[in-house]
Amino acid sequence: MTSAARKKGLYGLTRRRGTGLLFIVICATLPFYLLYTANHHIVLNEIRQHAMGVAIAVAASIDAADLNAVQGPDDKETEPFLRIRSLLDRVSAADPDIRYIYTMRSSPDPFASSFRMQYVVDQSTRDLNRDGEITRDEESEQPGNPYNAENLPELLNGFERPSADFEIKPDPPYPDLISGYAPIRDRDGRTAGIVGVDITARTVQQKLLLMRIILVLVWMFLTLILVMIVQLYYHQRDAYEQIRGMGGELSRRNDLLRAANEELALVTRRPHPLEGEETMAASPQPIAAKPLTNRVVVDQYFVGCAMMGGDFHDVFDIDPDHLGLYIADVAKPGVGAAIMSGLLRMALTSVHEDGAERTPGFYSNLTRPEELFQTLNHLLTTELPDDEFITMVYAVVDLMHDRLILANAGSPYPILYRKREGRHEVIRDGHNIALGMDANAVFASCVRDVEVGDKVVFYSNGILYAQNNRGHLYGMERLETVVREHGGDPISDLIDAIKADVLWHVGEEELLDDVNLLVLEIR
């Protein structure tokens, strides 16, 4: 999977986009959750009121004298017992939500705790689940059977006033229930017992299920609509960014093509073409030996070869405290080299203009050679053919901190001459792969402290590979010797010394590659 595919994810979702969609889902869910919670309480309160209302109505229909007349199992056949049970059975049969309906009183044992109760009259035994068997929870409780109401405070409150459980309560061996209670009072207002009405959790859940289904369906519909709207927004934004990127890419390619055409036009206007060969490459604009700032002087020397080469260079101010310069060489000579040099020159110009005119923060790239190489390499691996590459050395003079920051992409090693010490150093670190060869290449730079009088010699392969009539190359060792002997001379004298030595070595032989020499002096 490519890095772009990993960035987009398996379903075209970036982490940021996925987070946005998750936020939308959460925002859509929260109101429905609150609505469900509110309706859950409303349904529970409705059931509480229903159970309590039935208990109040039944309690008002029971004569306290009848309840007091039933004291134990022996009273099951008495008129008071039968009248109360008949009433309970009629109410239970008339309301399918009621699972149990019964009467209770406090335990007559004077030493019993206040939460000790006993059944008085319960509804008749019946097969509630209609499975043909009577289970323990379907049997009628006998008068006098004890009951522990320790965990049912609302049942105890039922002796004082009508009440109901606030939540569904477990009550083994019976199913989970929510119950309502009401006191049975005699003519003097004294409580003889209570009526309890139980509604099972299953009944509550059935009432809540329909509400949940409706809410979930509405939530899914609205969430889907919101997600589709957000996705549509993302797609439109992506399309806009893609169109804008394509427009920028087209503009950049047009600029590169225009630069290549201009370079090619310069090449075709050069006089004296060699028979069977192409014309010489256009020479870079000469840089006179003059101070670019009050502290830096740059001089150069260039000679084009018989074949069209691709050597070129430039020196420019990055900001008041930084000076940038480079020497570059396109690998293959000929018209293609001239075109490629035009492309790279245009790319460097674009980078510099991007920083200067649109995003001043991009100066950090121009003052950091490894970052500039990263940017150029990305561009050139896209634009260059597979068999083309460009060597380049790029240096930044940091005038504020008196140092040279340098990165080298396949070019010959620069030579630093230290005037105070009278010695030279070949800068071999900060060396990297050539530009345009590997899109994933990582580039490094190096730093050297410099002081007044120090010189840095930048040069192309054309100097090292200059041949005499015996096929001997000029070479690095000979160049170091000239720099060591003339490094303390004025910058123009050093240029003349190198030029004279190279031409003396070559003699009347033709150069096979451009000779490009750039010398920088700190003042």
Image (cartoon, rainbow, N blue to C red):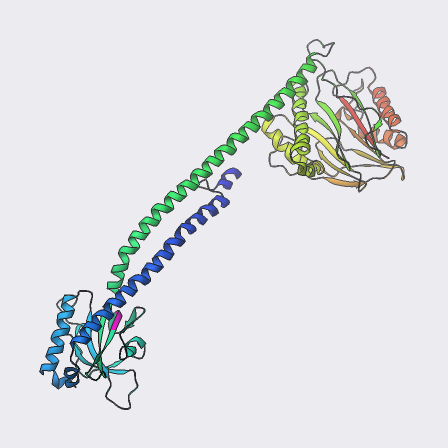
For the point 23% across and 82% down, the residue is 189
- Judged from this view, the residue extending furthest toward the front is 188
Q: Nearer the viewer, residue 56 or 44?
A: 56
Q: Residue 206 placed where, x, y %? A: 25, 60
Give the percent coordinates (x, y) of residue 259.
65, 21
Residue furthest bottom as drawn: 110
Instruction: Name the residue at 48% across, 44% down.
Output: 17
Is residue 386 visible in the rendered image? The answer is no
**Residue at image point 56% right, 25% down:** 250
Q: Is residue 171 left or right of residue 239?
A: left
- The quadrant the C terminus occupies is top right
Report which quarter residue 405 is drawn in.
Answer: top right
On screen, 431 above or below 463? below
Nearer to me, 501 or 243: 243
**Residue 279 versus residue 1 in the image, above or below:** above
Image position of 436 with respect to 149: above or below? above
Which residue range is magenta in the image? Answer: 176-180
Location of residue 347 in the rendering, given as x and y in whole percent from the top left corner: 65, 28
Residue 448 position (above or below residue 103): above
Q: Is residue 353 visible?
A: yes
